[in-house]
Image (spheres, helix red, strand yellow):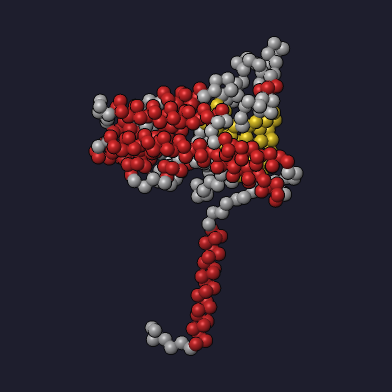
Amino acid sequence: MFGLNLTLFQKIEIAFILVVLGIAGVFLTLAFKPEHDMHVNVFNLPTRHHPLMSNLPVSATNPIDPKKDETVTVFGSQDGTLEITQFPNDPTQHPRFLWKPDVRHLDVKYMYYRDPFAAVDAIKDPFRHALAYATYNTVFKKSLGLLNSAAMGDDQKPKEAAAREAMLNQIKNTDNMANDGTFETKLLAEVMKALATYNAKPGDPSKDSAKANAAIKVLEAVSEYQGKVQSTKDGFIDKYMDTMDKMLSSDQKQKLIDAYKAYLASTQPSTQRGNGGRRAAAAPPAPARNGAGATTIPGRGNVTTNRGNRGAASRGAATVPAGG
């Protein structure tokens, strides 16, 4: 071949060199490939106290109500931080899960945090992707008004509004069930079991492998639970998008696609990832805690709770204006 007459020994040498180069290539690939960091750090925040009347400061006439005390355990991992809030003096209250995901490393996939926008990134069809991006922003963040570009007729607008209201009400009901501890009780029980096992095991997760493994089990249990919350919401969103897919004409669909592309072009490239899904957009803002104990619970699904006005925020979602 190529006018070269190689001896058997030379052929073996060349084969050996090729094998070595192949192995080196594998190691180089692994060296530059982002790897999951399995380290977990866990710490407890100071107990949060709340007065009897949440709308007034603590005073002699408005003392701290022990029943409202909140203990917060924070699990820090590659994904960010997970806060698990419990109410030790009120057995009627269920644990709250609050993810604060790390949005800086766009090349590393989340292991435990359930990104609501992951479903958007997975959609390849241009129209469905644009519609999903608009819808998920409406549900989990804020309406971008992208559907206005479709210029729906008077016969279409009531149908869209009805489908959107049904979707938001179903998502609200899912939120309320999660708030009440009645959603997927078996999965929730697995979370509490994993947390109890972690608390019972001595050691420091940053130094002790057994304690670290117990912490990972907690993260995995919460991830499975919140994954079920999110997949349930995804199903309701899919129904809404199916309605819109059947209702809009080809021209209207193209207008939405064009509006979506124009929107992406107007945003900073550093905030984009995947097929237009934005990790920064997927992370809900940190909750504003008040005397009523308001907490937002995301995790591939957001659950908003308020001890003084349960589900108020999620009920408010049903008033989102049309437009996507």
Residue appearing at x 53%, y 58% in the figure: 32
Residue appearing at x 50%, y 80% in the figure: 14
Q: In front here: 239 or 44?
A: 239
The residue sitting at the right extreme is: 202
How far across and how far down the image is residue 112, in percent? 56, 44
How far across and how far down the image is residue 182, in percent? 55, 31
Residue appearing at x 40%, y 36% in the figure: 237
The residue sitting at the front extreme is: 186
Give the quarter of the figure containing the C terminus: top left
Look at the picture and state if 298 lies above or below 13: above
How far across and how far down the image is residue 283, in percent? 51, 37
Which of the 4 image quarters holds residue 307?
top right
Res. 288 visible in picture: no
Give the quarter of the figure containing the N terminus: bottom left
Residue appearing at x 49%, y 38% in the figure: 230
The residue sitting at the top extreme is: 61
Which of the 4 image quarters holds residue 244?
top left
Q: In front here: 84 or 238?
A: 238
How far across and how far down the image is residue 35, in percent? 56, 54
Res. 229 visible in picture: yes
Look at the picture and state if 3 lies above or below 270: below
User: How many marks overall?
Assistant: 0
